[in-house]
Image (cartoon, coloured by chain):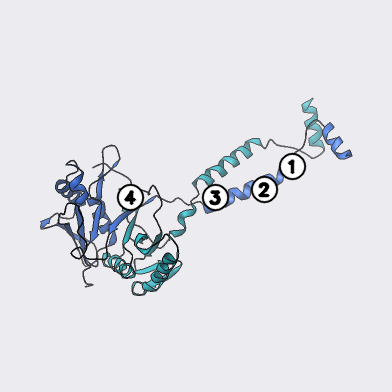
Amino acid sequence: MKVRHSERSGEKVQLQMTPMIDIVFQLLVFFIMTFKIVSPEGDFNIRMPIAAPSEGIPDDELQIPPIIVRLRATGTGHLSEIRMGETPLGRDFGELNQEVRRIVGDTTGPNIQDAAEVEIDADYGLQFEYVMDAITAVSGYVGPEGNVIRVCEKIKFAPPRPEP
Amino acid sequence: MPKQKERVRARSGFAEGDMTPMIDMTFQLIAFFMVLINFTEADQHERIRLPTSELAQPPDAPLEDAITLQLTKEGTILLGGEEFAIERLGVPLRREREVLEATPGKSVGRATIVIRADMRAKAGRVQEVIQECQKTGFERFALRAKQAERRSS
């Protein structure tokens, strides 16, 4: 009781800041050490049903043969050529995007867009980044306001080519 | 009068600085790091360099029953802290399937296999991974990419 009385009668109560500052610094160090700048990631859905399309139950959707995108690789795994069907498109994924947009039509209504399917047929040794570029080019594009405009949502892979 | 008090304190060896701005700043820093900390990076691996895509954007809702497979550029799979050859992937996948089937409301058909493949991995390897997963009964796949800077086209 004596101690309390003397504290209350004083002009200023002295708070012990040291333990709090210790803990605060420990927290700060923990967060700084565990901090890592991680860029956001996103997923592209791939439709790979187990039953082959001919064996599967036909759905009510409009049936359109898939657009086949052929990606040829050089010996070192780099891209040598893109073909859409029989049309050679060089090595420009922008051109592939334009072609897919021309065929699927991003303004012609939802029906064709929903039914359109792209089949990616890549060489075994092609580096995965080119496959991702192709998937990006066929799935959509960035609009003038920075928004993503989807063109084709259905993407699948052709049966794998044998290892050279 | 306050000056006199300070002088007395200084003489007694007890100088007190104003801690308030420092504590303010420290709390702000802690708040900054707390907000930005990302605990979900548990499924990321430093060996995997993801390809970039300007259309990749984080999903609004987390994927249902996602199983993350990491494909290295050498063509091996990292799953749950272990490294497997693609041909041996069936063993851990069957284990995952058993867990899914034993859990009410979950099924293999509804689970998604997230493939985090290295940008230098071979496309054929990615397809082999998909085939191995199909053999175990998985049907839904997602290829993961890092978000790139967007340019309108």
Residue occupied by mark 3:
A32
Give the image location of residue A48, x and y in percent. Answer: 27, 62
Residue occupied by mark 2:
A22
Residue occupied by mark 1:
A16
Residue at point 18% right, 64% down? A54
Position of B150 with respect to A105 (left or right) is right
**What's the CA distance linking mark 1 and mark 3?**
26 Å
**Type of amino acid under label 1:** Gln
Please state the chain letter of the residue tagged with numbered disc 4 in the rendered image.
Answer: B
Give the image location of residue A50, x and y in percent. Answer: 27, 65
Chain A appears what colour? blue
**What's the CA distance linking mark 3 and mark 4?**
28 Å
Res. A58 mark: none
Please state the chain letter of the residue tagged with numbered disc 3 in the rendered image.
Answer: A
Could you classify mark 1 by the number of other residues whose Cα lies within 10 Å: few (under 14), some (14-19), or many (20 or more)?
few
**What's the CA distance linking mark 1 and mark 2?**
11 Å
- Both marks 1 and 4 on one chain: no
Res. B56 mark: 4
**Type of amino acid under label 2:** Asp
Among all residues in the image, which is located at the extreme left? A86
Please state the chain letter of the residue tagged with numbered disc 1 in the rendered image.
Answer: A
Chain B appears what colour? cyan
Q: Nearer the viewer, residue B10 or B86?
A: B86
Give the image location of residue A66, x and y in percent. Answer: 17, 57
